[in-house]
Structures are given as C-alpha cells and as structure tokens.
Image (cartoon, rainbow, N blue to C red):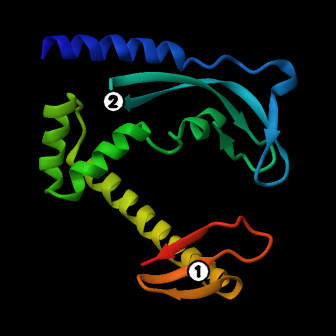
C-alpha cells in the first residue's frame, strides 16, 4: 500500500506539472462566445481534479464575454473536465463500480482498488449520468442502424444462399461479398 501511495503521489505531482496551462499569447486572448460576441481572456484559474493517480491541480485560462457574461475554460472542454471535478478515467471507474452494487459499496471499492476517496453521492451521480448518456447513445445508434440498414437494403442485390442471405454490394461500391446470418 505504501508503494502504491508513493507512486500515485509521484504520478499526481507529474500530472499537475503537465496541466499548468500558460496565459494565452496576445493574439489569442479572445475566442467566440455562444452569444455571437467575443469572450476575452481574464486570468489563469486553478481547479482541483481527482484523477486515477490522485488529486491534481489544473491551471487554465479563463475567458469572459463582456456582452452576456458567460465564462469559458477551453482547456476544461479539451480535457473533458468541464463542470466536473473528476477526470474521465475516474468517472468511468465510478460508473463501473456503481452499476452492479450499492453506491456505498462502489465508493469502498474505489478506495480499496485505486486508493481514491469519493463520496457515495458522487458514485451515484456519475453512474446515473453515464447511464443516461449510454441510453441516449443507444437510442441514436438504434435510429442510425435502422436508417442505414434500410438504405443498404434498397441499394443491395440480395441473393439467397444455403446458410443465410448473401449480400452483394451495388455497382460502384467495393466488390466484396458478405454473408449475413
């Protein structure tokens, strides 16, 4: 356990160093705002994020729109830590331990297996949020799959074979034959 803790601490220290974003160059001190105006660089702000190796500090540029007062952290979007204090890896771990067991048991598993301290509520919220995202993605995939399958059926030349349907690509497509079972 002591070796793991030391390795996590070293990893978190190194990662914190890598996540120190400098102030933008003078020609990059504004960016588009969703309102249509330009957000202007204000300062570098810090945020603590729990990662697979422990807590790290992320310093990143903050932009504020003078028109609508909407603040932006482009680095948060790039790192997928916008509106969260957990890295993508920790969120995946929370979702995994939260899907098959009570959330408090998931919290305990994260402590035991990864030496990460999270609240029971954090495991619950993350598991539910990712579950909703998966369900939304599945619905989109089902709609896409159904539409794509219908389009392929309209364009393909179907031939019955002994072990299922043999699909031949239409003219102009790559000439490969696949068997659908």
Question: In the image, is residue 69 above or below residue 26?
Answer: below
User: Viewed as shown, does residue 45 lie left or right of 39?
Assistant: left
Dot 1 lies on which element? helix
- Please tell me how crowded label 2 is: few (under 14), some (14-19), or many (20+) other residues with Cα within 10 Å: many
Image spot of residue 19 (x, y percent):
53, 20
Give the numbered dot on residue 180: none
Residue on which disc 2 sits: 52
Q: What is the distance, in whole Å, between disc 2 and disc 1 at their CAs?
A: 40 Å
Q: The C terminus appears in which quarter of the rendering?
A: bottom left
Q: Earlier in the sequence, mark 2 or mark 1?
A: 2
Image spot of residue 36 (x, y percent):
84, 53
Image spot of residue 63 (x, y percent):
71, 34
Question: In the image, is residue 144 above or below residue 1?
Answer: below
Residue occupying the point 53% across, 41% down: 80
Q: Quadrant of residue 166?
A: bottom right
* Comparing labels 2 and 1, the label whose residue is closer to the camera: 1
Residue on which disc 1 sits: 149
Outermost residue, right direction?
A: 27
Dot 2 lies on which element? loop
């Amino acid at each position: 356990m002591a070796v793991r803790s030391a390795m996590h601490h070293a990893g978190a220290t190194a990662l914190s160093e890598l996540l120190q974003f400098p102030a933008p160059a003078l020609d990059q001190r504004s960016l588009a705002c969703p309102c249509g105006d330009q957000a202007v660089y204000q300062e570098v702000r810090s945020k603590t994020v729990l990662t697979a190796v422990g807590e790290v500090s992320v310093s990143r540029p903050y932009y504020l729109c003078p028109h609508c007062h909407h603040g932006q952290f482009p680095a948060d979007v790039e790192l997928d830590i916008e509106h969260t204090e957990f890295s993508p890896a920790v969120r995946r771990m929370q979702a995994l331990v939260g899907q098959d067991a009570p959330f408090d048991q998931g919290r305990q598993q994260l402590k035991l297996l990864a030496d990460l301290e999270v609240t029971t509520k954090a495991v619950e919220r993350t598991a539910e949020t990712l579950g909703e995202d998966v369900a939304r993605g599945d619905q989109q995939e089902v709609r896409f799959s159904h539409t794509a399958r219908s389009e392929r059926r309209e364009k393909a030349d179907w031939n019955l074979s002994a072990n299922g349907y043999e699909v031949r690509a239409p003219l102009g497509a790559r000439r490969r034959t696949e068997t659908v079972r």
